[in-house]
Amino acid sequence: MTEEKFKDDKEYYSDRSYMSNSSLKLLRESPTKFSLWRENKWNYPNASFFAVGSALHALFLEGKETALVYEGTRRGKEWLKFSEENEGRDILNPRELNCVHDMYDKLKHSPKVMELMSNFRPEVPATGELMGVPLKGKADALIQDWNGSYLVDLKTTAKSISEFQKGARYMLYNQQAALYKYLFEVDDFYFVVIEKEFPYEIGIFKSSDRFLESGLYELKTSIELYKRLFIDGEYNRYYTAEYEL
């Protein structure tokens, strides 16, 4: 593992020289959006559900209250001015802020979560290389002790815990687990998932060997697609993907 000391989050996320799990997922979703993203001509749209997750990450993992509260409607000139002045911040309405605090409280009072995440290092970035392509990842929580090492990734979900389990491969969470396990050279990878609706059910998912093997397959598939389209030069703006069902 090579821990990369990026100056701050802005530098980490604006860097385009390394491929990350999110950028590889974007490539699989849309090579056109990926191409525009590389050229800084497209970015992920702001959405409140992203802000809720981001605010919970900051509060639970780093003890930081980062959310800004906006009580008006998210439209019109006043909202546009506020959002532009606070670009990059987690803007929530009062109900969403209460949701973040309730999820935080539920996580803090879960004995299993607190046992799993005792003595962790938050937001640790690392870089590496696979198949000749530079890769990066930022671990939510890195745990290293005499008993071994593992990563924990915190996720919020609008669906049930059981639905998360069913859709993990579809969402390429197996690719994320394989990439991070490879970059950080840890023994295990866990997801801690919390529902965003009362009573905020929590699930802890340990990545099995089978899950990780499928993730490594997806990771190599993503890298091969990246190399074919953007290193070998096969991509063009009229690219059309072909599939077999």
Image (cartoon, grey):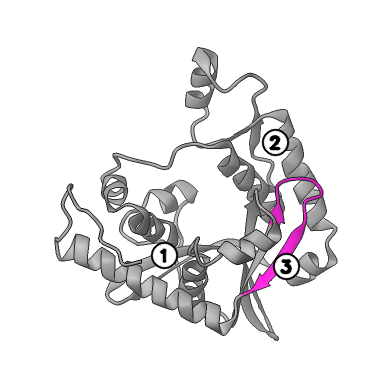
Any mark on residue 136, and which? 1
Say whether residue 58 is magenta: no
Which amino acid type corresponds to the residue marked 2 in the rendered image? Glu
* Residue at screen point 25% across, 58% down: 241
Q: Secondary structure at mark 1?
A: strand
Could you tell me if residue 93 is visible in this image? yes
Mark 1 → mark 3, Cα distance in angstroms: 23 Å
Which of 141/178 is in front? 178
Q: Secondary structure at mark 2?
A: helix
Question: What residue range appears in magenta?
Answer: 194-206
Which of 233/218 is in front? 218
Q: Secondary structure at mark 3?
A: loop
How dense is the environment of label 3, judged by Cα within 10 Å: few (below 14), some, or many (20 and up)? some
Q: Earlier in the sequence, mark 1 or mark 2?
A: 2
Mark 1 → mark 2, Cα distance in angstroms: 31 Å
- Image quadrant holding the C terminus, namely bottom left
Mark 3 → mark 2, Cα distance in angstroms: 25 Å
Q: Depth-wise, is mark 3 or mark 2 nearer the camera? A: 2
Say whether residue 201 is magenta: yes
Q: Report if the CB atoms under discs 1 and 2 are less than 8 Å apart.
A: no
> Mark 3 — residue?
117
Which amino acid type corresponds to the residue marked 3 in the rendered image? Met
> Mark 2 — residue?
96
